[in-house]
Image (cartoon, rainbow, N blue to C red):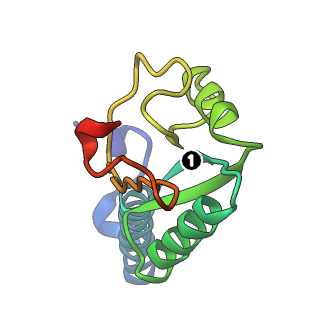
Amino acid sequence: MDDLSKMGIDAARLPGWLRFVVVIVIVALAAGASLAAYRWYARPVTLSIAVGSLDGDAPRIVSALASRLAVNNAPVRLKLVETGGPIESAAAFSSGKTDLAVVRGDVGDLSQAQAIVVLTEAVALLVAPPGSAISDIAGL
C-alpha cells in the first residue's frame, strides 16, 4: 500500500486538467530556475579602477575604455574611481579600496601589484646653449 492510497488519494483518479496544470507548473519552475542560474553565471564582473593624473589624460582614457567595454557587452566592466593623482591611486589600490590602479611603477607601496599594461615613452632631449663646447654625450 503506497502513501497516496493511505491518505485516500488515488493518483489515477486525479482529473486530467489538474495533472496538466501540475506538469505546466513544474516545467515553468524549472525554466525559471534555469534562466535565473544562467543570468547569474553570465553577469559581467565589475572591477573598480583608481585613476588620477595631473594632466587629466588617464581618466579620459580609462573612461573611454570602460564605455567601450560596456558597449561591446564584455564580460568585464570598469568602474572609474577618480583620485587626486597617482599617489592617491596607489594608496587606494594598496589599501584594497580598488581592484586596479593606473600608476607609475615607482609610486607608493605596490608590493601586491601586478602589471596588466605597461606604457612607455622613452624620449630624451639634450639642449646645449649656442656656442657651447659640448658636442657629444661624453662632453657633458
Q: Is residue 74 above or below residue 6?
A: below
Q: Is residue 44 above or below residue 3?
A: below
Q: Is residue 60 left or right of residue 110?
A: right
Q: Is residue 12 above or below residue 20?
A: above
Q: Is residue 64 left or right of residue 44?
A: right
Residue that appears at 38% across and 70% down:
74
Name the image quarter holding the C terminus: top left
Dot 1 falls on a residue whose secondary structure is strand
Q: Quadrant of residue 98?
A: top right
Visible residue check, residue 2 = no
Could you say which is closer to the camera, residue 88 or residue 77? Answer: 88
Q: Position of residue 55 (x, y in %)?
A: 69, 59
Q: Position of residue 126 (x, y in %)?
A: 41, 53
Q: Quadrant of residue 80?
A: bottom right
Residue that appears at 51% across and 37% down:
99
Could you say which is closer to the camera, residue 61 or residue 8? Answer: 61
Residue type pointed to by label 1 = Ile
Residue that appears at 29% across and 52% down:
135
Badge 1 is on which residue?
49
Name the image quarter holding the N terminus: top left
